[in-house]
């Protein structure tokens, strides 16, 4: 593994901590880490990212350790990739964090939608990096590669050998297929909106325990494993809340620092499940030494996918692993709207359901809206579910003042005027 700290590029995790996370990713992909090197730089080398002296050190270590894969913690540019392949030769396969995460996703995609999204992200990542070396090494790896000792798989050797035009054509086809998936999901969401069942999306850093929590809440059987990105495809389950209310809980793909932009773009259809939710449960592994950095990474990703406006509860998971109850209390005091739970043992689940119920059904927020005339359905919803205090018909739309229950805030968000305040 190769870790680089560039002074002008601040990171959420330290160099050593980021490499430790990379090692977990490598293990998830089926690789065995045999060593690592680091370098701190004022600025990146435009040709090879790292300095020539460090490259010589890597050459020596690769030979000494009989390494087959060189794994960079940061995304390599196409130029970095080409120059490093020329300098280090064909006997070592060069990957970066993005390629590794894409491979993990390809292993864990269990639905047609997930497979389409991963394939699109892989092609868009590899198209500018298509070289003879990539083709040769992909053939050497042998498809899934685990039998060949590499532990990685890509789109396949024949796909890597086609020219850029054919790959571009495939990318266009995949995007069209994903648009169909997106339209299908939107129809499902429309039906859910008509049923007026609120949707709660579970978000969080990978391996924070979201799937275990959904299993506990819904008495479901979502796949769970103690590894990064065990869950890739979204799963929705019905959950009964206190007071006889019902809502839908959706488990979503985990986030991670340095999440590849190709994945955020390719997984737009899936991530819209988050952006369209009425409430977010931000699940954190409270026992992790970098829990605050993980929280920041999730919040940054939510902002990137335009989901940072949705009401949120923080779920501090795995309290059964804390040394004493006071540790959980201190953690709850740090995070706003936090509930401490153990999804594995069921501790705190009743308190969490009560908090979700309050957010969705018992808390009201005062809003001042300007609704376009075409949004008559939203006006009817406000009258039906909210507390309307004033309605004025203006030239640009309908001014509405009143109180909305928490479960409906996200639906009206784009029409809220700046002078709205919370009581």
Image: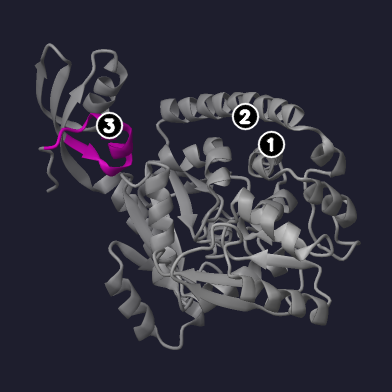
Residue 256: which disc? none
x and y percent of residue 42 in the render? 43, 70
Place of residue 141 in the rendered image (x, y in percent of width and height, measured from the top left): 86, 56
In this figure, which residue is indicated by the disc labeled 1? 116
Task: Give the farthest residue toward the bottom.
Answer: 323
Task: Measure the C-alpha gap from mark 3 to mark 2.
Answer: 25 Å
Are discs 3 and 2 less than 8 Å apart at CB?
Answer: no
Q: Position of residue 302 (x, y in %)?
A: 40, 49
Q: Is residue 285 above or below residue 157?
A: below
Prevalent SS, magenta region: helix
Secondary structure under the numbered disc 1 in the rendered image: helix
Q: Which residues are magenta?
A: 403-418
Direction front: furthest residue: 52
The correct choice, above or below, for 138 with respect to 399 in the image is: below
SS at circle 2: helix
- Taking the magenta stretch, the answer to whether it contains residue 166 is no
Q: Which residue is mark 3?
A: 414
**2 and 1 marks in contact (CB < 8 Å):** yes
Viewport quadrant of the N terminus: bottom right
Mark 2 lies on residue: 178
């Amino acid at each position: 593994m190769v870790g680089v700290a560039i002074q002008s590029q601040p990171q959420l995790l330290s160099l050593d901590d980021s490499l430790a996370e990379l090692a977990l990713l490598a293990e998830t992909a089926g690789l065995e880490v045999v060593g690592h090197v680091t370098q701190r730089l004022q600025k990146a080398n435009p040709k090879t990212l790292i300095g020539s002296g460090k490259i010589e050190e890597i050459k020596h270590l690769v030979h000494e350790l009989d390494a087959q894969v060189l794994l960079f913690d940061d995304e390599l540019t196409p130029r970095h990739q080409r120059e490093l392949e020329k300098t280090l030769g064909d006997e070592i396969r060069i990957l970066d964090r993005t390629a590794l995460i894409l491979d993990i996703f390809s292993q864990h995609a269990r639905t047609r939608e997930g497979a389409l999204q991963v394939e699109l992200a892989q092609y868009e990542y590899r198209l500018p990096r298509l070289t003879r070396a990539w083709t040769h090494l992909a053939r050497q790896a042998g498809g899934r590669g685990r039998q060949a000792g590499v532990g990685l798989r890509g789109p396949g050797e024949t796909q890597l050998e086609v020219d850029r035009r054919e790959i571009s054509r495939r990318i266009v086809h995949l995007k069209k297929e994903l648009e169909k998936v997106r339209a299908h999901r939107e129809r499902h969401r429309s039906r859910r909106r008509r049923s007026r069942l609120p949707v709660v999306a579970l978000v969080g850093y990978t391996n924070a325990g979201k799937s275990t929590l959904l299993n506990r809440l819904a008495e479901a059987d979502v796949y769970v494993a103690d590894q990064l990105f065990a869950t890739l495809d979204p799963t929705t389950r019905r959950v009964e809340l206190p007071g006889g209310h019902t809502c839908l809980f959706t488990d979503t793909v985990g986030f991670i620092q340095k999440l590849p932009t190709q994945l955020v773009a390719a997984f737009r259809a899936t991530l819209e499940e988050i952006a369209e939710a009425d409430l977010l449960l931000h699940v954190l592994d409270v026992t992790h030494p970098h829990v605050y950095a993980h929280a920041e990474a999730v919040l940054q990703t939510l902002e990137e996918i335009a989901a940072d406006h949705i009401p949120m509860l923080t779920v501090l998971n795995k309290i059964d692993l804390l040394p004493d109850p006071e540790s959980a209390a201190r953690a709850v005091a740090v995070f706003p709207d936090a509930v401490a739970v153990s999804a594995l043992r069921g501790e705190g689940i009743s308190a969490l359901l009560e908090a979700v119920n309050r957010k969705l059904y018992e808390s009201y927020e005062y809003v001042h809206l300007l609704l376009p005339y075409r949004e008559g359905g939203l006006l009817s919803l406000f009258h039906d579910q909210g507390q309307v205090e004033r309605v004025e018909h203006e030239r640009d739309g309908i001014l509405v003042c009143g109180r909305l229950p928490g479960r409906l805030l996200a639906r009206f968000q784009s029409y809220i005027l700046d002078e709205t305040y919370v009581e």
